Image: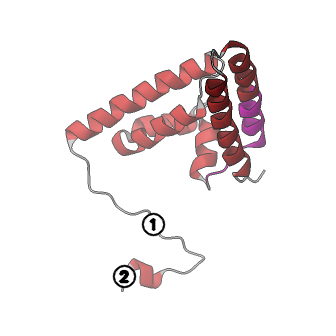
């Protein structure tokens, strides 16, 4: 009998086994994870630069290239809760939603004050509005 035939709703399926990646692919993914982490740290400091998306991409790449880096990210004081929420049901905390909303509102004001063409401002603000609509539709983690 296969694993799927023995599966009951109470016992989740084990994660699918992936064949090991070639060494070059693992190194490229590890470099990508490092780049995403650098961009995430910059995003913590620079207003308007996203952090969460880069942390999620770094975790994705690390999970496929370096279990040690992936574990470090999951245990990290700042990044860990975001990643654990995402990996446990694609949830986003209310605090993260409000932080993203405040940051995008600030950026929208900056765009309105500095855009040389109204259509550029509309494009940027419209994109942020779409992201916020998607973000607020994400479930929140259980306390």
Q: Is residue 4 above or below residue 12?
A: below
Which residue is depicted at the point 44% across and 62% down? Answer: 15
Q: Is residue 129 above or below residue 43?
A: below
Looking at the rendering, the stretch of residues picked out in magenta corresponds to: 90-102
Closer to us: 107 or 93: 107
Q: Is residue 31 above or below residue 7?
A: above
Badge number at residue 75: none
| Residue 111 image offset from top left, x and y in percent | 68, 19
Place residue 133 in its image quadrant: top right
> Mark 2 or mark 1, which is nearer the start of the sequence?
2
Badge number at residue 14: 1
Place residue 83 in its image quadrant: top right
Closer to us: 91 or 75: 91
The answer, for residue 99, to whether it is visible in the render is yes
Q: Is residue 105 magenta?
A: no
Q: Is residue 28 left or right of residue 13?
A: left
Q: How many marks?
A: 2
Which residue is depicted at the point 55% across and 39% down? Answer: 74
Main SS of the magenta part reads helix
Residue corresponding to mark 2? 2
Which residue is depicted at the point 53% across and 70% down? Answer: 12
Q: Is residue 99 magenta?
A: yes
């Amino acid at each position: 009998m296969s694993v799927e035939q023995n599966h009951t709703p109470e016992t989740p399926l084990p994660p699918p086994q992936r064949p090991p990646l070639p060494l070059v692919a693992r190194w490229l993914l590890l470099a990508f994870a490092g780049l995403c982490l650098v961009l995430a740290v910059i995003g913590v400091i620079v207003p308007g630069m996203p952090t969460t998306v880069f942390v999620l991409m770094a975790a994705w790449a690390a999970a496929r290239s370096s279990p040690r880096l992936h574990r470090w990210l999951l245990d990290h004081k700042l990044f860990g809760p975001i990643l654990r929420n995402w990996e446990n049901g694609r949830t986003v905390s209310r605090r993260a939603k409000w932080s993203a909303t405040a940051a995008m509102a600030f950026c929208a004001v900056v765009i309105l004050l500095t855009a040389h063409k109204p259509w550029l401002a509309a494009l940027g603000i419209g994109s942020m509005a779409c992201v916020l609509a998607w973000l607020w539709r994400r479930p929140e983690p259980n306390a």
